[in-house]
Image: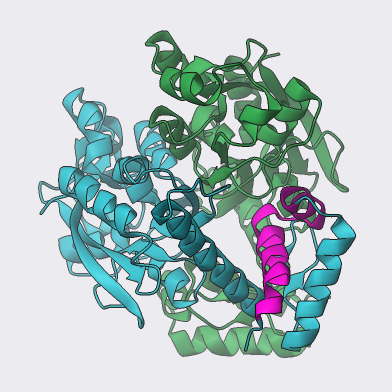
Chain colours: A cyan, B green
């Protein structure tokens, strides 16, 4: 499908999608913007389909993103080659990863820091959907709650992130004076990370045996979620590691003694696995230190 | 354009977009999923255009989202009416807002907590782009760095969020032994919130007078950004309020003594302003307490 003569165009495409504009890509590649534009146009003609959606920022079409990822994989192989030949590898190619926001907020930074000299390009999504980015070929690896392998990918169990349902003591006294009843739950403001988040709904089902329409604040940020609970805006499930100081100080209380453990998995494209071996080792180390076995 | 008989359909549409599925919307409205589906189909026929993109989650078309927002505005007016008539207002309608992630992480939670009994539906975006959500009619108000009013909206200056460029002392010693030079900057890993983030590029321009291609980690989370700096992954600009404990403890150092102040504005749809007056008052109070005048 590709010719070796397509690689300058592929590099231009990857740079445009990484930097978001033809100008920035041109500067990163030390060529003129019009050279970048010509190279991409040539590749679009070869492929017979648009690769870049012009705009601010410039975005890739499905085919464009898949081709850019190929270029990034080649870049990693080149970095590995340079390393094996004892040469300095030039500027590193960022590794695109999809990570659930709660992992980034609790243990994934340590995993990145322990992986050596890599650059990372993170996409955050819900733990039930982060593997979709891998399925679509937009990232090389993902931290996800998905427990079946993505086609073409390896799966490494990482352990579980532990959550508790919490609120301030004042919130619980006001909204749940008679405990966690369906009548109270349909009136008490709850927290929702985003429309894909099922943690609160599943917890309500476990507590009451019913699916209930919950009044919700939508707060798509892990620390924002904890802060919203602390401010008395609502109740919600938060990672234990972020709660410990607040539970110990009595600023938050658990609404039920049972934790919710969400098992997480490292999904990695088999093609990328060899060059990302140091990252996989670091991810497993950091997960072992932070997650429930 | 609308008939009063369209309101059940509008309520069904708003519920589907809020909850992400026909089933969840049906439950929230206490009707069957097929009733929800029929109502939306009838409205789509009336409008002559699709309103919902079926999928997981269900999403709105441009027209569908605009109609849902109208229903949310009507819901707020109803809540105000119930309050004025001294009746309990039933379940509250969430207020859709666009907020830059750094504001949510530093002062906006206090603004929401001080606004009384409202539910909030937050969308996070870069401070230079959060007002776009208001322009597209998808939110009722936004915290943004945009300093010109959005058509049909009021503008309230809030003060400035102060940033410093920081890294660990080890990172600075290793990557900037001779100070912030162009030669060092093009090799030292930097942090980028997302492809819209211009803070680091602008700082480099201010420090060196040049636009430079920076090697970057992309970390789309405010606390993730601070954590990445603490882990020595890169240098980047972070809100002062999140840095203070780390600067005092010597875990991070500033790369230049000058702060970067980003002025922020509260943009609010003129139609929504009356019912959101308590929120606007609370936003101004919280901003006064946290931002630089």
- Dividing the image into 4 quarters, which one contains the C terminus of chain A? bottom left
Nearer the observer, B79 or B250: B250
Q: Is residue A16 magenta?
A: yes
Q: Residue at x 67, y 12 (%)?
A: B258
| Left or right relative to B71: residue A79 | left
Residue B49 visible in the picture: no
Above or below, B258 relative to A280 = above
* Quarter where residue B103 is shown: top right
Q: Quadrant of residue B47?
A: bottom right
- Furthest-front residue in view? A85
Q: Quick one: A97 or A99, which is closer to the camera? A: A97
Task: Tell me: B166 left or right of A204.
Answer: right
Residue B45: tell me if it is visible: yes
Decide if residue A231 is on the left or right side of residue A10: left
Q: How far across and how far down the image is residue A243, in percent?
A: 25, 35
- In the rendered view, would you say B42 is above or below B82? below
x then y, percent, for residue A51 = 72, 76
B67 is within the stretch colored magenta: no
Q: Main secondary structure of the magenta part?
A: helix
Tell me the magenta residue range: A4-29
In this rendered view, identify the residue nearer to me: B33 or A293.
A293
Q: Considering only vertical position in the picture, is A229 above or below A82?
A: above
**Residue B8 picture location, percent across and down:** 61, 76
Residue plotted at (70% across, 86% down): B44
The residue closer to the viewer here, B245 or B45, is B245
The N terminus of chain A: image quadrant: bottom right
Residue A182 position within the rendered picture, expressed as x and y whole percent measured from the top left: 25, 60
């Amino acid at each position: 499908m590709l010719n070796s003569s397509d690689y300058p165009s592929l590099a231009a495409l990857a740079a445009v999608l990484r930097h978001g504009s033809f100008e920035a890509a041109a500067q990163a590649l030390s060529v003129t913007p019009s050279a970048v534009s010509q190279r991409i146009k040539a590749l679009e003609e070869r492929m017979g389909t648009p690769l870049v959606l012009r705009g601010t920022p410039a975005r890739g079409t499905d085919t464009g993103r898949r081709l850019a990822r190929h270029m990034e994989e080649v870049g990693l192989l080149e970095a590995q080659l340079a390393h094996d030949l004892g040469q300095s590898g030039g500027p590193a190619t960022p590794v695109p990863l999809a990570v659930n926001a709660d992992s980034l907020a609790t243990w994934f930074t340590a995993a990145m820091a322990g992986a050596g000299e890599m650059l990372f390009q993170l996409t955050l999504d819900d733990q039930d959907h982060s593997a979709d980015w891998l399925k679509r070929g937009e990232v090389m690896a993902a931290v996800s709650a998905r427990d079946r392998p993505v086609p073409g990918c390896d799966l490494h169990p990482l352990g579980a992130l532990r959550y508790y349902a919490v609120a301030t003591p004042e919130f619980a006294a006001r909204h749940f004076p008679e405990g966690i009843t369906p009548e109270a739950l349909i009136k008490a403001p709850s927290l929702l990370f985003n429309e894909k988040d099922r943690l609160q709904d599943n917890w309500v089902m476990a507590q009451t045996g019913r699916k209930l329409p919950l009044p919700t604040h939508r707060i798509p940020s892990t620390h924002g979620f904890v802060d919203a609970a602390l401010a008395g805006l609502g109740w919600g499930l938060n990672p234990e590691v972020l709660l410990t100081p607040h539970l110990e100080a009595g600023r938050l209380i658990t609404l039920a003694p049972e934790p919710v453990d969400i098992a997480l998995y490292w999904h990695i494209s088999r093609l990328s696995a060899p060059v990302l071996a140091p990252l996989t080792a670091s991810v497993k180390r950091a997960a072992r230190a932070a997650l429930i076995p």
